[in-house]
Image (tube, rainbow, N blue to C red):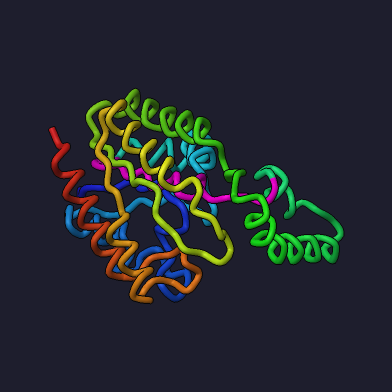
Amino acid sequence: MGAHLFVVADSLAFHGPERIEQPTDDRLYPMVCARELGAEVDLVAREGWTARDAWWALTKDPMAYGVYLPRADYVVIGVGGMDQLPASVPTWLRDSLPYVRPGGLRRRLRRAYRDLTPGVIRATGGRLRQLPQDATDRYLTRIIQTIRVLRPDVPIVLLAPSPYRSPYYPSNRHHAGASAAAHRLAVALNVGLVDPESAVLQGLRDGSANPDGMHWSWTAHRHVGCALAEALAGRQR
């Protein structure tokens, strides 16, 4: 029976420089990482997921806690990057939009949210985060501690928040603090950490990243995937 890499992530795990890709695309960072380790990928991911969403997935999705985690030989926690993004409204309000009825009103509200968000962020200086840093730290800690209880010997690596230059989120106010917090948390909880900063910034500078300024170039996917594999292999007991 082959090795398994369990990845809990956001859209960076399945989004390339042009579009959303099939999650089995060999160029995506989870697949690159798994290939380096000689493993298969078990992916739990969704667009826009924060650390809170990842905690809910780990504790509420029976495939995550009942199949993927028990058979995992390696674990990558690829959430936290969405948390740092500036917000125009509280996240609970944004997340409630899909429940608005009738459909015409919902579509108008979504368009208004999309169109107004960049201006609101610029006007407020991006003070509001999608998820407060203390909440991000708390949920990441819960995730790691729960994995340790169930699988005390499995290697765990945290992916630090990715840099971005997006017209949809025109403020980097929280990035440096979010990155520093991820480094502190990795040390405090004794897990590995891969910081994608240099690989991702190169793609943002040379235009090979997605035009949305959020999603990575294929070169960044390759570098991050290889770095994750190296970090995971180094934590094997």
Q: Is residue 61 visible?
A: no
Q: Nearer the viewer, residue 162 or 43?
A: 162
Q: Position of residue 130 (x, y in %)?
A: 58, 45
Inspect the magenta stretch and tell me whether residue 86 lies in it: yes
Taking the magenta stretch, the answer to whether it contains residue 31 is no
Q: Quadrant of the C terminus?
A: top left
For this rendering, which residue is in front, 63 or 44? Answer: 44
Examine the rendered structure and indicate whether residue 183 appears above or below residue 89. Answer: above
Q: Quadrant of residue 193?
A: top left
Query: Is 54 placed above or below 25 here?
Result: above
Main secondary structure along the magenta-highlighted residues: loop
Start and end of the magenta stretch?
Answer: 72-89
**Which residue is at a point 44% across and 59% down the rendered structure image?**
164
Q: Is residue 111 left or right of residue 217?
A: right
Residue at 46 percent across and 37 percent down: it is 58
Is residue 25 visible in the rendered image? The answer is yes
Label tally = 0
Q: Position of residue 6 (x, y in %)?
A: 33, 46
Residue drawn 17% across and 53% down?
Answer: 37
Residue 42: give x, y in percent of width and height. 35, 51
Q: Quadrant of residue 192?
A: top left
Residue in the foreground of this view, choosing between 64 and 191: 191
Residue 36, by quadrant, is: bottom left
Relative to the observer, which residue lies in front, 133 or 61?
133
Residue 90 x, y percent position in the rendering: 68, 43
